[in-house]
Image (cartoon, grey):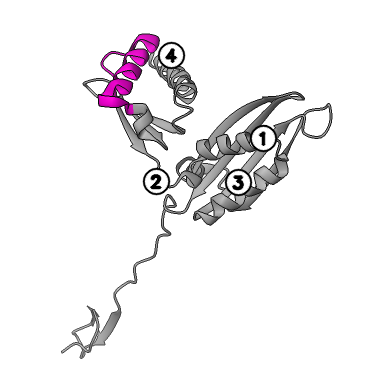
Amino acid sequence: MSAVKELLKTHLRNSELDEFLAKELKEAGYGGCEILRTPLGPRITIYVLRPGLVIGMRGVGIKSLTEKIATKFKIQNPQISVLEIEIPELNPHIMANRITKLIAKGIAFRRAAIWGLNSIMKAGALGAEIIVSGKLRSDRAHYEKFRAGIIPKSGFPANTVTTEGKSDLLLKLGMYGVKVKIAKKEAMVPEFKFKEAPEVVKVEGSEGEGTKEARGEGTPS
């Protein structure tokens, strides 16, 4: 198998694993995962709101989840660790799920989206964008976008600063989709500064000695 096919296969498996964990750990407040390849096997870090529901009594839950992942995705020796999300308002998966739950309760999608936007910005985000799509006001599907702050759209900042989460909801009118993008301040690369060049002092010598240059502060002796 070529390197390109192997890379595509890995990305496809990671996407399927993310969808599986989102359904399996919905009650625990699933907030995404990170997958790192190691010589001992893939290391999977899962972020949730309630780690106790994932780990279970005496580690029964985490053992069961490890077996399911190894069997379903044919992963040998997966190493799973569970971490708690410290600030849920800065996690796009959590906020997308919260907005869909509010819409499911009958709250207007605009009100739910604005509430989510305000919650994200109050938590200290650099910027946020929420897109709600579906049959919002008529039989024709469309979308509405809500934005605050700064959201990098392209280049290196867009890949390192911005995170994205999605959530779907089935109502009588049809399927609703909520996409949340959050840009974090701490992920921004600090602006570079030019170093000040050392001061150059020219010293005029007597005839035949030429011109000399001295670097640094103060008067040369």
Q: Earlier in the sequence, mark 4 or mark 3?
A: 4
Q: CA distance from mark 4 to mark 3?
A: 39 Å
**Which residue is labeled 2 in the image?**
86
The answer to whether the residue labelled 4 contacts the one labelled 3, judged by CB atoms less than 8 Å apart, is no
For the residues labelled 3 and 1, the Cα–Cα distance comes to 15 Å
Q: Which residue is mark 3?
A: 116
Identify the element where label 1 is drawn: loop
Q: From the viewer's perspective, is the residue at label 2 or at label 1 nearer?
A: 1
Instruction: Check contact, mark 3 vs mark 2: CB within 8 A.
Output: no
| Residue at the image position 42 percent from the left and 53 percent from the top | 186
What residue is disc 4 on?
5
Q: Position of residue 97 (x, y in %)?
A: 56, 34
Residue 95 point in image, percent of width and height: 55, 40
Q: CA separation, marks 4 and 2?
A: 37 Å
Q: Earlier in the sequence, mark 4 or mark 1?
A: 4
Q: Give above or below for 55 relative to 117.
A: above
CA gap between label 2 and label 1 equals: 26 Å
Report how far apart the C-alphas of labels 3 and 2 lie in the structure: 17 Å
Range shown magenta: 55-79
168 or 219, nearer to the observer: 168
> Which amino acid does the dot numbered 4 rest on?
Lys
Question: Are dots 4 and 2 in contact, CB under 8 Å?
Answer: no
Which residue type does callout 1 highlight?
Answer: Lys
Circle 2: element type: loop
**Taking 115 as reference, is 195 left or right?**
left
Which mark is in front, 4 or 2?
Answer: 2
Q: Is residue 20 above or below residue 117?
A: above
Whether residue 98 is in magenta: the answer is: no
